[in-house]
Amino acid sequence: MIIYPFAVAVLNAIFATVVWRQFVSRKRPHQLVWTVALLLGCLAAVFYLLCLAFGHNDVLFKLYYIGGALLMAAYLGLGSVYLHAPRTIANWMAGALVVASLIGIVSLMAAGLDPIR
């Protein structure tokens, strides 16, 4: 069933465009971070669609999982930190999140998948 991931990709792309335009006019960091998070959700849905289209592929599935499960929610939360916390705290949180993201990406890409489907 491709309707749901297709809708997720399209809606995330639309919302990312709207929030990006807000960022361009207002220059608020939370809008930039939310744009990144929405683009991660869009990419995750596209990777999932590619998994459905081309059959099981470990790399595509891991990229789907990284974008949708590992990173998207974390960066949405970081946008909220930028919205509510002092800038210095938000910047420290952003640095910590980038480091944690890199560790998570490397760990997930190195992990094996259960071959039983």
Image (cartoon, helix red, strand yellow):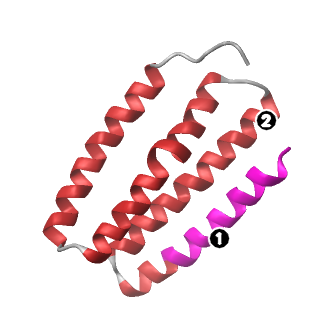
Q: Which residue is mark 1?
A: 14
Q: Which residue is mark 2?
A: 52
* Residue 26, percent from left and from top: 38, 86
Quadrant of the image for the N terminus?
Answer: top right
Quadrant of the image for the C terminus?
Answer: top right
- Graded by Cα atoms within 10 Å as few (under 14), some (14 to 19) or many (20 or more), the crowding at tag 1 reads some
Q: Are marks 2 and 1 in contact (CB under 8 Å)?
A: no
Q: Residue at x 73, y 24 (%)?
A: 56
Amino acid at the residue labelled 1: Ile
Q: Which residues are magenta?
A: 1-20
**Residue placed farthest to the left in the image?**
88
**Residue placed farthest to the top in the image?**
115
Left or right of 114: which side holds 37?
left
**Residue placed farthest to the bottom in the image?**
25
Q: Residue at x 63, y 64 (%)?
A: 13
Most frequent secondary structure within the magenta stretch: helix
Amino acid at the residue labelled 2: Leu
Q: Secondary structure at mark 2?
A: helix
Q: Is residue 100 above or below residue 88?
A: above
Quarter of the figure with residue 49: top right
Q: Residue at x 52, y 44 (%)?
A: 69
Residue 112 magenta-highlighted = no
Nearer to the camera, 39 or 117: 117
* Residue 17, percent from left and from top: 58, 72
Left or right of 89: which side holds 75?
right
